[in-house]
Image (spheres, helix red, strand yellow):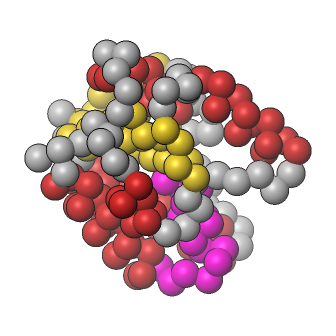
Amino acid sequence: MGRLILILGGARSGKSSFAVTQAKKLSSGQSGVVYVATAFALDEEMRKRIERHKKRRPASWKTIEERKDISKILAKLGKASIVIVDCLTILISNLLLSGEKEAATLKKIKEFFKTLKKRNLTTLIVSNEVGMGIVPENRLGRNFRDIAGQTNQIVAKLADEVYLLEAGIPVKIKG
């Protein structure tokens, strides 16, 4: 049975850095770490952001870029012992903007993480905590916030450990 760790926090709270640091500790310098990147560059600023993320990761780690169909990665994990999915909320955004319905999105994500948990992997999930901000003024923003909040709850329930990052400081809230 695998171990599932959810890492939540606001924008620029240190979630991704914490996930990478934890994976390095857990892997003890061994290979077998797969980094699943859900972001893609639509502009120069995002391209630079992605490059900074890449530089944090050891060259020995395998990177899988998957914007929407997260179930595709299961076949690509090989002999991985640790998987980082960064970032769940970007995945949700990608699905929502492609026309995916809320129920289908929630079902896909729940099944994916149940399947991962059955494997002998340690999986670290990075996701934005979206429930502490203001109510978005438009329907798309509210739908995103609602789906992200529900998804975080689903994953938190399945997770063995949950961390909340505030200003780069991890606070363990489950496990």
Q: Is 92 colored magenta in this rendering? A: yes
Residue 93: image location, x then y, percent: 61, 64
Residue 120: image location, x then y, percent: 17, 44
Q: Residue furthest left?
A: 1
Q: Is 24 colored magenta in this rendering? A: no
Q: Main secondary structure of the magenta part?
A: helix
The quadrant of the picture occupied by the C terminus is top left
Q: Which residues are magenta?
A: 86-102
* Viewer-side residue, 69 vs 130: 69
Residue at x-position 81% and y-position 56%: 42
Residue at x-position 53% and y-position 42%: 63
Residue 128: image location, x then y, percent: 52, 46
Compared to 66, does 138 lie above or below? below
Compared to 62, does 41 lie above or below? below
Compared to 95, does 159 lie above or below? above
Can residue 157 be seen here? The reply is: no
Residue 135: image location, x then y, percent: 61, 61
